[in-house]
Structures are given as structure tokens and as C-alpha cells.
Image: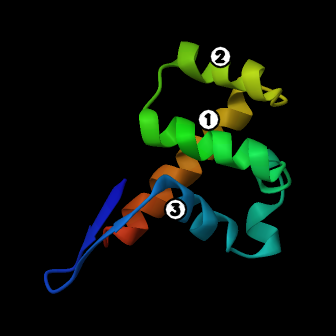
Amino acid sequence: MVLSDDGLVSRTFTAAEVLRLVLAGSEDANAGRWFSTASTETRSKLAEAYALEPYPSDQQMDKLARALRAPSKACVRTFYQSMHLKAMELCGHG
């Protein structure tokens, strides 16, 4: 869950909402992001994994990559980095 607070309004975003906002970027921004073309089921599992542990270890990312049949652990790392950047934007740090 991500908390956005601008001093006047506080709002929380679920991991699924943050992922939706990540994917709402331009086609160019999503080019090369394997999760942008992944199935809805895979994206749901990624969002669930992020909600459970937003800062996984390398071993956890490797396990998730195997479970989701991602091309590599680096692809899963890109997902987490994208989520972290969007979360920072939502919190006013972007």
C-alpha cells in the first residue's frame, strides 16, 4: 500500500492501483517492460508479491521470476523499480 499525502489530502493506493498507473504511461515507456505485455494473471501475481514485500531480496526475486516464468530476475527487478518510482511520484517525490 502506498500513502500519498500532499498536506491537504491523504490517499492510499493498493499495489494493483500503482501497477495500473505504471502501465498507464506511454507505449514508449512500456517498451521493454516484460510485465506490460504479461497476462492479467501474471500482473495480478506481481501486484500481490509487491503488496507482501515491496523490497524483496535477490533470492525472493529469483524465486518469483521462476514462478512467473519471467525471462530473468532482472525483469522482475525492473517491475519493482517501476513500482518504486511510481510510488515516489504518488507521494510527491517525483
Disc 3, SS: helix
Of badges 1 and 3, the one in the foreground is: 3
Identify the residue at image location x=66%, y=24%: 64
Which residue type does callout 3 highlight?
A: Val
Instruction: Using the rendered view, name the quadrant where residue 88 is placed.
Output: bottom left
Residue 6 rendering spot, x and y as whole percentages: 21, 80
Disc 2, SS: helix
Crowding near the residue tagged with mark 1, few <14, some 14–19, many ≥20 C-alpha atoms within 10 Å: some
Residue 19 rendering spot, x and y as whole percentages: 59, 59
The circle on residue 33 is: none
Whether 17 is drawn above or below 60: the answer is below
- Tag 3 or tag 1, which sits nearer the N-term? 3
Crowding near the residue tagged with mark 2, few <14, some 14–19, many ≥20 C-alpha atoms within 10 Å: some
Whether 14 is drawn above or below 72: the answer is below
Question: Which residue position is annotated with label 1?
Answer: 77
Q: Number of labelled discs? A: 3
Identify the residue at image location x=63%, y=41%: 46
Question: Which residue position is annotated with label 3?
Answer: 18
Of badges 1 and 2, the one in the foreground is: 2
Residue 89 rendering spot, x and y as whole percentages: 41, 68
Question: Which residue position is annotated with label 2?
Answer: 63
Identify the residue at image location x=73%, y=36%: 75
Q: CA distance from mark 2 to mark 3?
A: 22 Å
Res 54 seen here: no
Q: CA distance from mark 1 to mark 3?
A: 16 Å
- Tag 2 or tag 1, which sits nearer the N-term? 2
Instruction: Using the rendered view, name the quadrant where residue 30 is placed.
Output: bottom right
Which residue type does callout 2 highlight?
A: Lys
Residue 51 rendering spot, x and y as whole percentages: 45, 42
Q: CA distance from mark 1 to mark 2?
A: 12 Å
Task: Spot the residue most to the top.
Answer: 59
Q: According to the image, what is the colour scheme of the structure?
A: rainbow
